[in-house]
Image (cartoon, grey):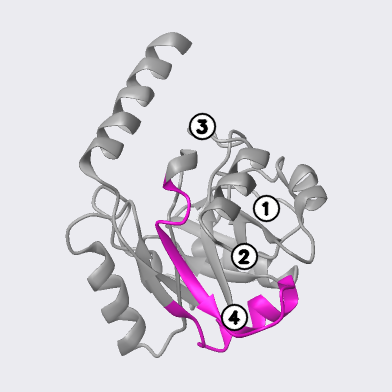
Amino acid sequence: MLRLDLHVHTTHSRDGFCSVAEAVQMAKARGLDGIAITDHDTIEGHAEAKKLSGRDFVIIPGVEISSADGHILGLGVSKLMPRGLSAEETVKRIREQGGIAVAAHPFAFGRRPGVVHRARFDAIEVFNSRALFLANPLAREFAEKNHLPVTAGSDAHYCDEIGLASVTLNCKANVGSILKEIKGGRASISGRTLPLWSHLRGTLHRIIHRRWRT
């Protein structure tokens, strides 16, 4: 059995504060068997992640793409696609690489709504630790009604957030087997939401960085 956090950001994301090495160290400390590196609109962390991925710990190369319709996770991708494409085109390009396309936090408050209605996804992220209020229940309801596979991830931007949400899979510890199991709808979901202070920490950091850049 493998337990994986499928939505992790590192310092390669504009709002990430955990290096790839630190993310791996924390994930192992939390008892995870692997993570997906899903930085915002970049795959710059893939080279380092590849060196840290092995038999005892698997790292899925991924990306969180800002499509014209909302955020989409590409799991198992090795090439970056442009941001701003339609959801349908983004999903197509992810699949062309042999990856799977996941609707990220599709009902999260403050996000652009409707991404799940713009394309047929390989899976829906039904538990995201950063999603508040009814976002996660609505995502699960949509997945169930449309008979779509599910995933979960912490959406960690800080090291201590890694592992707050995860999937459990009964498969071999390699990317191909993991993607096949997810797409086959055989992922078990678990997780808890971020405490309020973590949301406040992120907001404060964004304000400080925005002022520093200007």
Say which residue label 3 marks.
17
Question: Residue reaching furthest left?
Answer: 133
Viewer-nearest of discs 1 and 3: 3
Q: Which residue is mark 1?
A: 81
Split into 4 quadrants, where in the image is the C terminus?
top left
The amino acid sitting under disc 1 is: Met
Q: Mark 4 — residue? A: 1
Dot 1: within a 10 Å radius of its alpha carbon, few (fewer than 14), some, or many (20 or more) residues?
A: many
At label 2, the amino acid type is Asp
Which image quarter: residue 20?
top right
Residue at the (66%, 66%) spot, across then down:
94
User: Earlier along the polypeptide chain: callout 2 or callout 4?
Assistant: 4
Of callouts 3 and 2, which one flags the residue occurring earlier in the amino acid sequence? 3
- The reply to whether callout 3 and callout 4 are in contact (CB within 8 Å) is no
Query: Which residue position is annotated with label 2?
Result: 33
Q: Nearer the viewer, mark 3 or mark 4?
A: 4
Instruction: In the rendered structure, find residue 153 and report the number of the disc placed on it.
Output: none
Q: CA distance from mark 2 to mark 4?
A: 9 Å
Q: Nearer the viewer, mark 4 or mark 1?
A: 4
Q: CA distance from mark 3 to mark 4?
A: 29 Å
Query: Residue 187: x, y in percent?
Result: 49, 81
The image shows residue 42, relative to residue 166, as above or below, that is above
Circle 1/circle 3 CB separation < 8 Å: no
Quadrant of residue 169 within the rendered picture: bottom right
Visible residue check, residue 121:
no
